[in-house]
Image: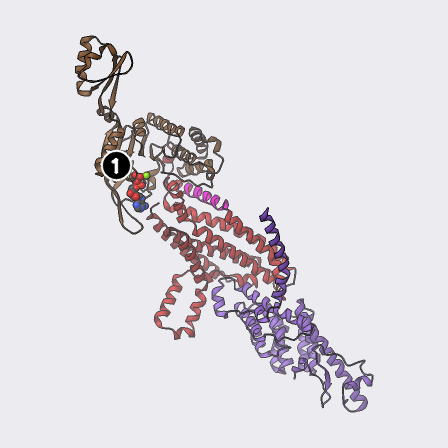
Chain colours: A brown, B purple, C red
Amino acid sequence: MNPISIEGLTKVYRDKKRRRVTALQGLDLQIEAGEVFGFLGPNGAGKSTTIKTLVGQIQSTAGCAKLFGIAAGDPRARRRIGYLPENPSFYDFLTAKEYLSLVGRCFGMDRSAIERESERVLELVDLHPAAKRKIQGYSKGMVQRLGLAQTLLHDPDLFILDEPMSGLDPLGRALVKQVMIDLRRRGKTIFFSTHVTADVEAVCDRVAVLVGGKLQTVNRVSELLEKGIEGYVIQLPSATAGLWSDFEARPQSDDVCEVFVPRGKFNSFMAIAGREGVEVQLIEPRRRSIEQFFLEIVRRETE
Amino acid sequence: MKFRLLFGILLLAHALLLPHLSERLKQRSVEVKLGYIPHPQILKVSVADHSLPVAEAAVMKVLFYFGTLVEKFQENIVIRPEYLNMYRTLETAILLDPYNMDGYYFAQAAFTWEVGRVKEVNRLLEIGVENRQWDYWLPFYIGFNRAYFLKDFAGAAPYMKLAAERSGDPLFAKLAARYFYESKQTDLGLLFLDTIIAQTKDKAIKATYEMRRAALLMVTALEKGVAAYRSARGSNPERIEDLVTEGLIPEVPVDPYGGNFYLDSDGRVRTTSKLAEQPK
Amino acid sequence: MPLPAVLLSAKRMSAHQFVALTLANLRMIIRDRVLHGVLGVAGVMLVLVPAFSSFSMRQSQEVAISLSLSAISLVLMVLTLLLGTSSIWRDIERRYTASIMTLPVSRVIYLLGKFAAMALFLLICAVILTAAGSLVVLLAATQYPSDLPISWGTIALAVLADLVKYLLLGGIAILLSTVSTSFFLPFFGTLAIYLAGSASQEVFEYVSGQFGQEIPALSLAAIKGTYYLLPNFAAFNFKVHAVYALQVQPGSVVFACIYAATYTGLLLILAAWSFNRRAL
Ligand SMILES: Nc1ncnc2c1ncn2[C@@H]1O[C@H](COP(=O)(O)OP(=O)(O)O)[C@@H](O)[C@H]1O
Ligand SMILES: [Mg+2]
């Protein structure tokens, strides 16, 4: 049973003038246990709509979504998940500790477990010094950190995070990435939305691209990175520069020159190098980044 | 700094204005003071569950207004009171809260002696007798009003009996007996006033009752003088001053209601003031 | 580490959630500055009661009781209005629902938690205000000895009935706030229903009498239909009984409670339906 299973999910909103706004169209998506899944899309693509349907904030117009086999919307479906909303807002008249205690009670944790775990997660997100202050006085980043802490409290199996890095400083971003990497190591499933491709590259196993409410592609990040290799940048002693008339070459410094070898010509380059006994100083793959990949899809889709 | 100065000036001006404000408001016409009270049906529907305090507030309003009238009256300033408006307001209060004793009490105090609206007052008091089933004052008032003002002794009897039953107090039985057998109106009135003054704490009402009592005492003294004159001379005195020349009274008393006492052709004590207007 | 959530039965877990949410919401209420202000005003009102009741001529004690009861009722009404009408829509607007409702909490539990917190707070306020009011009444009762005893039981009953009434009103406020996206509909809607529900019995009796024969049958039917649809707040008014120490029929209390329970139950179910279909 997959942690998340989405079939034919469609959402049509009504705006203020009762006009139809199609936010999501026939989305099919299966998230497998233990993977970190990136949900990539530009603003307004329908990422939050998908996630809100999963956690029962809104009802879909058509199609179905399940969490661990239980229909989304059923409170029981949320027992094993930790959810971080986009721009979260918590009961701000409570302190962080009081809030975590409320969350723990809602997950059916007992008092001692709540005490122990809230200490742990507050420590983890660096909120310990502010734990006894009211959330009212928190900065946006602190609230976001509390949001992350709140998802970790009951050690769920599935994390659903809507733009978890937004509103955070570089330290916070690094922290979130580290937390995600640790969770993956512990076999947890993470489904998170983002519009930042670097985040995907850093932590994801798979990535889906959503544009205009339609799913464009689903790829393994490792495959994308592999497929994206266009060629290699190779550094060689300047003395050998004469050998590379077939390639783009440029002097790098007095005794080093740099040659770009397209992916298909790598073997012929290696043959020359081997024959001439050239000392290769450095080989670096040049790849089309995920950002370019993403931008291409968006451009193609919006044309 | 400028603002502080300005603030100081405004504060001073404001403080200087305040006494004038209250002076001005005191000068308002009485209609403004008593104001207007909506129809009881409308009021009842619009005050939700606060009808008791609203009723009490209406009574208070009339009472305070009446207080200023009594003050003016004692300073010999005569103004025409708005009796109709006062009565309406009281009636509204009683319809809002048929248990409100202040309403009945005030109606009895203000509309019988001064205004002679005895029948209307009795009609209000009936509502009270019905609702305040434990109360003996209300039947006592009705009984008194019937006997003293309306001379309806037969009609008064059952109320006096009811008051005696409800109170279990022999005073009322005694009063009842006296009402039936004494014909002297002034004594009857004095008896009632003595009873009621002992129970009154509101200053305005107490003042009116005491003024009434003082006047009645004067009348009693004069009546006694006339009786003594008659038994000595065998005829009624011609003028009231004859009682002084005979040494029966030290001087002709001054009617607190601003009139002059005189004797009519039958030798009965009369006055030119309002005091004479009732029990006829 | 085993998942604690999985170990609890659904029922136990709902109970835990209900208690936790009730307490959290109670904290929200208790930490609200506006409500502190309202309670401060309530204190001032009660402190002024002896002063006002001293103006009464014959029923200081009764006036003190009625003013205290009215003050308590008024304060409870204001609290109910403030709490009930700012509940669901405001939680959605502040996006509290996005964080709380996405825990494994059902919307019904959330709604009940909100209602229970409101009920608990009103109960606490009623108890405190009644204690304060009792002191005030004791103080005022010494000003003029009343013929009537102070019936503490009936006074407590009157406050309790008021409390039950305002819980019903709170149900209306919550229902309206589940369909609204702003303050206006719940606030003015609840206020209008409160006023109409307080007056409906009077109007009904009026049109049932002679006056009813003069109005068209259709309007009469509309008025009667509205009468049965609106909550009838007259059923919860035991203030006259408390003030004048009248006997309360146990049946009417029981009836009022059952009536409130069914009506409030219906309101909460409607609110749950409406809230269930709402996007957060
Ligand atoms: N409550 C709403 N009413 C109407 N339109 C909405 C509503 N919420 C979102 N939308 C529209 O649906 C589309 C998808 O929004 P969303 O899922 O929030 O995008 P994102 O991918 O940025 O999270 C957008 O065009 C947005 O304007
Ligand atoms: Mg979004």
The answer as to whether callout 1 falls within 8 Å of ligand 1 is: yes
Q: In this view, does C41 lie above or below B178?
A: above
Crowding around mark 1 (Cα neighbors within 10 Å: few <14, some 14 to 19, many 20+) is many
Q: Quadrant of the C terminus of chain B?
A: bottom right
- Is residue C133 visible in the rendered structure shown here? no
Image spot of residue A54 (x, y percent): 30, 39
Tell me the quadrant of ligand 2. Answer: top left
Whether residue B271 sits left or right of residue A234 in the image: it is: right
Q: Is the magenta stretch mostly helix, strand or loop?
A: helix
The magenta segment is C16-31
Q: In which quarter of the image is residue B151?
A: bottom right
Q: Furthest residue to the top?
A: A277
Q: Is mark 1 on a helix, strand or loop?
A: strand
* Residue position for label 1: A210
A60 left or right of B3 in image: left
Q: In this view, does B262 lie to the left or right of C6?
A: right
- Residue C53 visible within the image: yes
Q: In this view, does B207 lie to the left or right of A117?
A: right
| Parent chain of label 1 | A
Above or below, A112 relative to C267: above
- Amino acid type indicated by mark 1: Leu
